[in-house]
Image (spheres, rainbow, N blue to C red):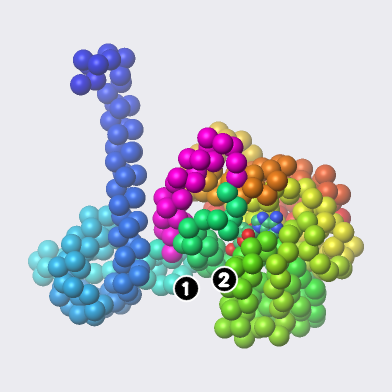
Amino acid sequence: MADAANNKIDEAKLDAIVSRAIGDLSAGYGGVMVSLGNRLGLYKAMAGAGPLTSHELANRADCAERYVREWLGSQVAGGYVTYHASSGTYELSPEQALVLADEDSPVFIPNAWAVPASMWADENKAVEAFRTGRGIAWGDHDGRLYCGVAAFYRNAYKASLVAEWLPALGSGIEKKLRTGARVADVGCGHGHSTVLMAKAFPASRFHGFDIQPESIVEARKVAEVAGVSDRITFSTARADDYPGADYDLICFFDCLHDMGNPVAAAAHTAKAIAGDGSVMLVEPFANDRVEDNVSPVARIYYAASTTICCAHAISDGGHLVLGAQAGEARLADVFRKAGFSRFRRALETPFNLILEARL
Ligand SMILES: C[S@@+](CC[C@H](N)C(=O)[O-])C[C@H]1O[C@@H](n2cnc3c(N)ncnc32)[C@H](O)[C@@H]1O
């Protein structure tokens, strides 16, 4: 085919990109199966159970066997479940269970598939946005986006925020949190980060702010369930005019790049923070240059940034549309312009940059 159509085609390069594209397509189909396995409790029913027949799994998960058998085939084909041909049984290893069945594991993935599901559902909005240049507000997306984002980050926050990220700040903030600090969590979404900090530091007081009222309602529920409503308030507020002053710690978790005017948000923060306070800025991991952001993680972030982060920032005024792959240099520039004199990388993980700004 290639010879006839165009003799400049390099067959090896063609094979490589075709097999890459088929692998990606396969992952897309696999994502639907992962979501079903999660929603139907199939992975949980397999975790720790040893080898199971499709009938045994169907009984355990209260599902129809013929569907379960076909789903199991998809899992074996994708390497998510092991098949024992001699006994006709299927098994989830402890490692597979950590990724697919254990909701508290930092590497639990299924909920993350809710984000591309929402992106597909909103594809027409994205087409319209590309054509017109108009934005799409955070609150105008398919509902799966919010739970997907909250769940995607929640486990990383749970594993690392209190144990590693806060101690890495250079301002002795952890000590202050233990004795009683004043904390703002700006762009808090469903409030998982705020609640985790409030659980760990009962002597401190926490204030979560978000532009989206629905997220604030959800965040209050999360705090109620966690039993920390006595030390948290959640309010609808913009990052450039949230109330309060003299905060010892002001956090931005995965949200500064979503804002239409991040410099105004940082400038307001410069006024709201105590003289010796710290800003903790948690952003998607990124290097400063496009050519250095070539990885599966960067691909996820650039894609989400295209239809979600940039789209929201444009709808929010679009003064500076950082995108989710802004990188440390651009983020530092935002805080410099806002009047902060110190900015440093406290930590990095494969998914996040943990940065600190001080006056
Ligand atoms: C990707 S979500 C992150 C939510 C949460 N911090 C987390 O880590 O799960 C970004 C959040 O920023 C909020 N946001 C966007 N622009 C904002 C603004 N100008 N002021 C306050 N919040 C804003 C959105 O409503 C959304 O909840």
Check residue 158 in the rendering and tell me which mark sits there, or answer none. Answer: 2
- Rendered residue at 71%/71% (across/down): 235
Q: CA distance from mark 1 to mark 2?
A: 8 Å
- What kind of element bears circle 2? helix
**Residue positioned most to the right:** 275
Q: Are the two marked residues, 1 and 2, in contact with CB atoms closer than 8 angstroms?
A: yes
- Range of residues picked out in magenta: 111-135
**Amino acid type indicated by mark 1:** Asp
Q: Does the image show residue 103?
A: yes
Which residue is at the front of the view, 120 or 4? 120
- Residue 309, horizontal then vertical, whole percent: 59, 49
- Rendered residue at 31%/72% (across/down): 40
- Residue 98, horizontal then vertical, whole percent: 39, 68
Badge 1: how crowded within 10 Å, few (<14), some, or many (20+)?
some
- Residue 78, horizontal then vertical, whole percent: 27, 55
Vertical placement of 280 versus 63: above or below? above
Which residue is at the front of the view, 328 or 1? 1
Which residue is at the front of the view, 36 or 285? 36
Q: From the image, tell me which residue sits under label 1.
A: 104
- Residue 133 figure quarter: top right
